[in-house]
Amino acid sequence: MDPESYKGTGACINNSVIQLLIDELDNFDCVIPKWDQDFLEPLFAIYPVNMTIETAIKSINSGNYKLRTLLNENWNINYLSVENRIKPLDEKLISFLNLNHLSDLEKNGILQNKK
């Protein structure tokens, strides 16, 4: 495991979870993981590329930088349960860890400290 490849959010994404998102895209515009408390994981989702780019440009030009503005009310969105659908594939849910520093990997037991 190369620690340098773990820079930025979402560095420990499980391939099986990615495949699940792709499989669940069928007949939907996008797939977004959603927790039981209605919290969304918009950084770990699949979006329609062209429509998302258009929406992002409009949002940026209007000074709105919130990620939620990318969601179009006309999209057919598949909200995929984190607890029921993703957790069986990623038991510790490391796909959703916020990783910004090497120490974040160590704190979460993903990388052993070699000091």
Image (spheres, rainbow, N blue to C red):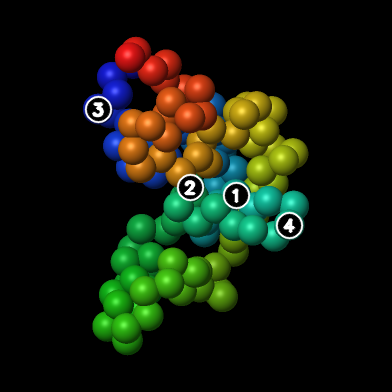
Please give the label number shown on residue 37: 4
Residue mark closest to the camera, 1 vs 4? 4
Residue mark closest to the camera, 3 vs 1? 3
N-terminal of the pair, mark 2 or mark 4, is 4
- For label 2, the residue is 44
- 2 and 4 marks in contact (CB < 8 Å): no
Task: Pick the quarter of the image with the C terminus.
Answer: top left
- 1 and 2 marks in contact (CB < 8 Å): yes
Residue at image position (51%, 29%) is: 108
Q: Give the answer, above or below, for where 57 lies relative to 62.
A: above
Q: Which amino acid does label 4 sit on?
A: Gln
Which residue occupies the foreground of this view, 8 or 26? 8
Residue mark closest to the camera, 3 vs 4? 3
- For label 1, the residue is 33
Instruction: Give percent across and percent down for residue 13.
Output: 46, 33
Instruction: Name the side, left or right, on which 61 lies relative to 72.
Output: left
Place residue 39 in its image quadrant.
Answer: bottom right
Q: Helix, strand, or loop for circle 4?
A: loop
Place residue 63 in its image quadrant.
Answer: bottom left
For label 3, count other residues whose C-alpha is less than 10 Å away and answer few (under 14), some (14-19) or many (20+). Answer: few
Q: In 3D space, how far apart are the residues under numbered discs 3 and 1 (Cα atoms)?
A: 27 Å
Q: Helix, strand, or loop for circle 3?
A: helix
Please give the label number shown on residue 4: 3
- 3 and 2 marks in contact (CB < 8 Å): no
Q: What residue type is labelled 2?
A: Phe
Q: Helix, strand, or loop for circle 1?
A: strand
Q: Which amino acid does label 1 sit on?
A: Pro
